Image (cartoon, rainbow, N blue to C red):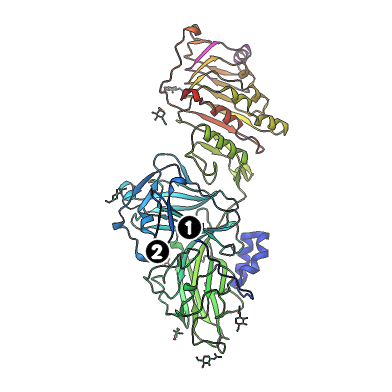
């Protein structure tokens, strides 16, 4: 029976922690206390009109703001709303849809800096309408959206004139909850609006704290198909309640006078207007093709959560009669005990189920044998797709701190969001929790190719304080595996990085500094680094190689190339007088830096990259 099946699947999904709430999940709400209707204030809403330059209040009283304070990348575009298929029924704000922000250029991830309150429930709604922006550039636009550190949705825009709206409810465990857009196979990522709504803690979560729920549909049953959807201020939580879906032709009735306000409920705070209409038929049956709803990324088996709302609104039914219903999904009863529909409180039936083979969800609702009233009734229904959100996988706090410092140093503020999750910045490589076996991700490579880093390396980079902490903790902090600063425009001498020599080493080591304008002598400490390759070509180094380095070269331990350093006395170099050299070039060599670092023990992940990237001195600007 469905009952067992659901409990079993539930335990598979949620493990030990889930068991405690399994009973609650399979749930018919009956409460003996009255919860007051907590109206969320509009002031708690965040409504971002992406691509807009103005703030305004719409006809519903929702205050929209331009996105300038949330994002530092991208460009604005205006689309031709006359061609857009945005009906009155959608309850979407056309003004907000009319502008979009898109992300040009090859860079990968771009983020909206969204701050939430940790350990509260939130609803986020994101809308995409490419219109003549996308139809002009690429037939199909594809990109991905992340929520916090989770890869949430892949967006495929094939009809540029019909909005795509994705809505999610979730429970963030930290306040910083960026929404990021990652470029896909074709076209440029864009977004028209982002709406964030706080929810009372009892809504939707039902114990699924590490799941995100993407709305598939939310129907205010009994509102004629084609009618306008309802939202704020009718629903203080600003959920959008659709009228009956076109495919569902189920008899219905409305009782505008039904006393639906301030009713007790245990979850989801159903709004009064939604309860005033209902489907009613001796058998309520509908099916929904879940396969037609885009599957969230990395979902193998599709699970969904449903909510059914019941309130007796028929005037001709009173305490002498009963309406008791059997609810079945895919032929299995949802609960052992039938649902008693009451007129003095809202019953919310919810559970988790998984999708049958044919992709269809079949719902049937009939009066049970004990029901004196032989007509079934349903006031509202919601289905959401469940997606596991692995909150345990995080980026090492040190990595986050160091990357933040690097971004500040080099004015890379356009890279926002988590450095590694859901996707690494395209100039970083991060460890993979699956292969490393650690849920804490480290930065393993830093690749600032083409970032125009130039100038002198400030002396203080050699004395970063983190190094000391690292030694005290006896951690194996950092391995220097490969580093390259070649094809850049660095000038000045290499500072003393000898402190690094005390750190652990790895199998392959090279230092590539070619194609820069480094000057000064080759520093002694390089001989104590575990290098097997040192590439110094095309620079302005001067003088002789340190004896220890020369020894390593002579004994075959080190491969050193240093062509075209006219003042360096090494190999076939000319070894001119350094005094005669011209001032360092500030030419336009291609910038290219590849620094690859691997670290262990979650320690000072980014110490060396920090050192190496520090090199863009203020003096060069
Ligand atoms: C789309 O068309 C409208 C109306 O013609 C125009 O104002 C707007 O600039 C166009 N947008 C783009 C991105 O081409
Ligand atoms: C639906 O409800 C209305 C009002 O209670 C009732 O008159 C009607 O008979 C019901 N329809 C069906 C099909 O039971
Ligand atoms: C459900 O939708 C999928 C994808 O749109 C489609 O391939 C499939 O045929 C549909 N199934 C039914 C039974 O309509
Ligand atoms: C129940 O409704 C019927 C028909 O409207 C009415 O005759 C009867 O008095 C009502 N009973 C009670 C207890 O309200
Ligand atoms: C609702 O009505 C039933 C039956 O009259 C009663 O037993 C129950 O206590 C009432 N519930 C509330 C919350 O008033
Ligand atoms: C590098 O800087 C030069 C001069 O400031 C600029 O023209 C060029 O576009 C920059 N290149 C990149 C990739 O940012
Ligand atoms: C150095 O720069 C030149 C000119 O841009 C380029 O052709 C060459 O490949 C670079 N050499 C190395 C080793 O990167």
> Which label lies toward us, 2 or 1?
2
Q: Residues within 10 Å of mark 1 (few under 14, many from 20)?
A: some
At a point 49% along the width and 35% down the height, the residue shown is 412
Magenta-highlighted residues: 535-553
Quarter of the image where one finds residue 326: bottom right
| Ligand 3 within 8 angstroms of badge 1 C-beta | no
Q: Is residue 369 above or below residue 461?
A: below
Question: Which residue bears the numbered disc 2?
Answer: 91
x and y percentages locating residue 238 in the rendered image: 47, 63
Ligand 7 located in image quadrant: top left
Question: Which residue bears the numbered disc 1?
Answer: 295
x and y percentages locating residue 313 in the rendered image: 50, 81
Which one is in front, 422 or 495? 495
Q: Is residue 55 magenta?
A: no
Q: Is residue 539 magenta?
A: yes
Which one is in front, 123 or 600? 123
SS for callout 2: loop
């Amino acid at each position: 029976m469905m009952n067992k099946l659901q409990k079993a699947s539930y335990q598979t999904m949620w493990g030990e922690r889930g068991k405690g709430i399994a009973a609650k999940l399979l749930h018919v709400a009956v409460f003996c206390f009255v919860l007051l209707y907590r109206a969320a204030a509009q002031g708690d809403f965040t409504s971002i009109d992406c691509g807009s330059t103005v703030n305004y209040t719409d006809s519903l009283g929702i205050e929209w703001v331009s996105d300038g304070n949330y994002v530092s990348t991208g460009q604005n575009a205006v689309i031709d709303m006359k061609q857009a298929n945005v009906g009155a029924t959608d309850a979407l704000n056309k003004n907000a849809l009319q502008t979009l922000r898109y992300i040009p250029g090859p860079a990968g991830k771009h983020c909206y800096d969204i701050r939430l309150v940790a350990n509260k429930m939130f609803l986020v709604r994101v809308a995409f309408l490419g219109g003549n922006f996308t139809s002009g550039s690429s037939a199909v636009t594809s990109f991905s959206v992340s929520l916090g550190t989770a890869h949430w949705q892949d967006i495929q825009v094939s009809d540029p004139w019909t909005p795509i709206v994705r809505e999610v409810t979730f429970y963030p465990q930290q306040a910083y909850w960026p929404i990021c857009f990652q470029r896909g196979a074709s076209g440029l990522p864009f977004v028209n609006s982002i709406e964030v709504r706080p929810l009372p803690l009892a809504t939707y979560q039902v114990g699924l704290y590490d799941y995100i729920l993407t709305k598939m549909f939310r129907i205010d049953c009994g509102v004629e198909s084609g009618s306008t959807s309802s939202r704020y201020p009718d629903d203080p939580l600003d959920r959008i309640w659709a009228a009956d879906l076109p495919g569902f032709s189920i008899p219905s009735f409305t009782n505008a006078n039904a006393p639906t306000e301030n009713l007790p409920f245990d979850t989801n705070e159903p709004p009064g207007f939604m309860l005033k209409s209902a489907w009613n038929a001796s058998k309520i049956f509908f099916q929904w093709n879940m396969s037609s709803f885009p599957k969230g990324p990395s979902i193998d088996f599709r699970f969904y959560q449903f909510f059914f709302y019941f309130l007796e609104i028929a005037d001709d039914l009173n305490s002498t009669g009963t309406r008791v219903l059997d609810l079945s999904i895919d032929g299995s009863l949802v609960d052992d005990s039938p649902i008693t529909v009451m007129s003095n409180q809202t019953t919310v039936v919810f559970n988790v189920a998984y999708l049958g083979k044919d992709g269809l969800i079949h719902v049937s609702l009939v009066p049970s044998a004990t029901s004196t009233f032989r007509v079934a009734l349903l006031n509202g229904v919601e289905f959401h797709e469940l997606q596991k959100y692995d909150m345990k996988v995080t980026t090492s706090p040190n990595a986050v701190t160091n990357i933040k410092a690097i971004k500040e140093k080099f004015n890379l503020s356009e890279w926002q969001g988590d450095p590694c999750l859901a996707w690494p910045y395209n100039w970083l490589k991060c460890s993979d929790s699956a292969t490393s076996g650690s849920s804490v991700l480290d930065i393993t490579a830093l690749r600032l190719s083409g970032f125009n880093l130039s100038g002198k390396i400030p002396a203080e980079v050699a004395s970063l304080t983190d190094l000391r902490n690292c030694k005290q903790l006896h951690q194996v902090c950092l391995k220097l595996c490969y580093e390259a600063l070649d094809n850049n425009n660095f000038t000045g001498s290499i500072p003393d990085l000898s402190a690094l020599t005390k750190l652990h080493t790895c199998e392959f080591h090279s230092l590539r500094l070619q194609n820069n304008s480094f000057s000064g002598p080759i520093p002694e400490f390089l001989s104590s680094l575990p290098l097997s390759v040192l590439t110094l070509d095309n620079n302005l180094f001067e003088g002789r190689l340190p004896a220890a380095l020369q020894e390593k070269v002579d004994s075959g331990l080190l491969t050193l190339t240093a062509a075209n350093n006219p003042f360096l006395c090494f190999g076939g170099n000319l070894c001119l007088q350094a005094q005669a050299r011209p001032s360092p070039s500030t030419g336009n060599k291609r910038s290219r830096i590849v620094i690859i670092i691997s670290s262990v023990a979650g320690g000072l992940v980014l110490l060396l990259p920090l050192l190496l990237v520090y090199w863009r001195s203020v003096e060069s600007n």
